[in-house]
């Protein structure tokens, strides 16, 4: 049976793995610095904003600092505990801590996306483009500067994808576990990982099962030990909510702007993508289910597409629309 957790099996586009290239450390350090400067320039104008959901995360961080009572919190936002906790426990202003964390996470996510592209065998221009597709996007400008947990979730998902295509199930398991601590729906990553390892008959299956159990234990601990006493909440599908969403031009515009570049590129690159992208296709379809369910229950915006960028970008890099602009692969290293 095919083993898609092997670094050697990366499809027709695959050159030698670039991690040991003599110039790789300087190249990757410079790329990370460039992404960080670009992310800062994009995020600066809306730095540290708190509206709607972001206000609830900010209040969670303030609660952990002892500045607000538990009654001020609104479920389910306090259950997405990791990033508000880091913002609260780091020294300095909570708002600035949260915004700085999101900047670091977005910069890191772009860098990890570029590493993923290199592992898939794309040439240097497309490696750089991978990070640009993540950063030069309306959601990065509009949502990432706010005090939301989405940047952390996207960074964890990008690290998970890197672990999958690089043949590093331990990295995928760790990223899925951290991602679940940031946002509960990322436990689906670990479920997918366990099923995929079982399907490919990998010895790392116990690691994935252990990570899945640890993620479940974390969610229970947050709900019943760390944050106790909030009113219960339920997300129930509603036809009224669907009708409301279809009539909300702001939500529709947000969805269109979030998907107008990456989605068409991913669709046109679906069949041309390297063989190592095959597991990402099933992962993408599975990870699309939680936001689709959320769309039936609550107001939605472009973040539901933004959260799929880590799986969409590797496919988008194979788009035939890029063939005349950027080479797909070199016989030499991408770095």
Image: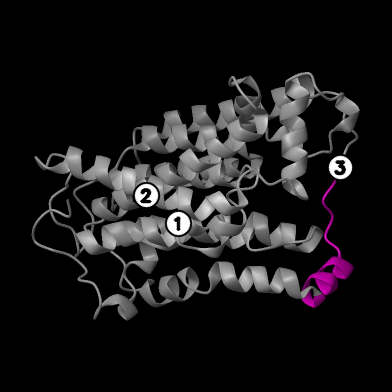
Single out the mark in the foreground, 2 or 3: 2
Q: Which mark is residue 135?
A: 1
Image point (65%, 68%), residue name = 254
> Are the residues at dot 1 and dot 2 in contact (C-beta closer than 8 Å)?
yes
Mark 1 residue element: helix
* Camera sees residue 227: yes
Q: CA distance from mark 1 to mark 2?
A: 8 Å
Q: Residue at left 39%, top 71%?
A: 270
Q: Is residue 246 above or below residue 289?
A: below
The magenta region covers: 233-247
Q: Nearer the viewer, residue 197 or 268?
A: 268
Q: Circle 2: is it few (<14), some (14-19), or many (20+) Cα within 10 Å?
A: many
Which residue appears at 73% of the width and 36% of the height?
A: 58
- Disc nearer the start of the sequence (1/2): 2
- The magenta stretch spans residue 322: no
Q: Is residue 240 magenta?
A: yes
Does the magenta stretch mainly form a helix, a strand or a loop?
Answer: helix
The reply to whether dot 3 and dot 1 touch (C-beta < 8 Å) is no
* Cα separation between marks 3 and 1: 34 Å
Residue that label 2 marks: 35
Circle 2 SS class: helix
3 or 1: tag closer to the N-terminus:
1
SS of the residue under disc 3: loop
Residue 98 located left or right of residue 299: left
Q: Nearer the viewer, residue 128 or 213?
A: 128
What residue is disc 3 on? 233
Residue reaching furthest front?
45
Q: On the image, which quarter does residue 232 sit in?
A: top right
**Residues under labels 2 and 3: Cα distance?**
39 Å
Q: Position of residue 249 (x, y in %)?
A: 75, 75
Dot 3 crowding, Cα within 10 Å, few <14, some 14–19, many 20+: few
């Amino acid at each position: 049976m095919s083993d898609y957790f092997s670094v050697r099996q990366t499809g027709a586009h695959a050159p030698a793995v670039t991690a040991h290239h003599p110039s790789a450390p300087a190249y990757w350090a410079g790329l990370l610095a460039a992404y960080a400067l670009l992310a800062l320039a994009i995020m600066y104008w809306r730095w540290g904003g708190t509206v709607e959901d972001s206000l609830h995360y900010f209040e969670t961080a303030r609660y952990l600092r002892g500045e607000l009572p538990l009654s001020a919190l609104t479920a389910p936002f306090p259950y997405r505990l990791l990033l508000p906790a880091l913002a609260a426990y780091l020294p300095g202003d909570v708002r600035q801590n949260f915004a700085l964390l999101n900047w670091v996470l977005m910069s890191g996510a772009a860098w990890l996306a570029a590493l993923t592209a290199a592992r898939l065998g794309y040439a240097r221009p497309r490696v750089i483009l991978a990070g640009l597709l993540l950063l030069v996007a309306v959601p990065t400008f509009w949502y990432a500067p706010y005090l939301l947990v989405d940047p952390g979730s996207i960074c964890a998902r990008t690290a998970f994808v890197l672990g999958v295509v690089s043949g590093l199930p331990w990295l995928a398991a760790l990223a899925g576990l951290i991602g679940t601590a940031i946002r509960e729906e990322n436990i689906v990553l670990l479920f997918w990982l366990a099923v995929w390892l079982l399907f490919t008959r990998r010895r790392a299956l116990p690691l994935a099962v252990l990570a899945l159990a640890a993620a479940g234990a974390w969610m229970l601990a947050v709900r019943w030990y760390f944050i106790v006493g909030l009113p219960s909440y339920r997300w129930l599908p509603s036809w009224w909510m669907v009708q409301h969403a279809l009539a909300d031009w702001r939500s529709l515009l947000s969805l269109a702007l979030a998907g107008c570049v990456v989605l068409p590129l991913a669709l046109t690159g679906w069949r041309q993508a390297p063989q190592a992208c095959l597991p990402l296709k099933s992962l993408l379809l599975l990870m699309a289910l939680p936001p689709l369910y959320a769309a039936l229950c609550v107001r939605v915006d472009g973040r539901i597409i933004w959260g799929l960028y880590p799986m969409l970008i590797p496919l988008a890099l194979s788009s035939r629309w890029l063939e005349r602009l950027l080479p797909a692969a070199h016989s030499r290293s991408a770095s």
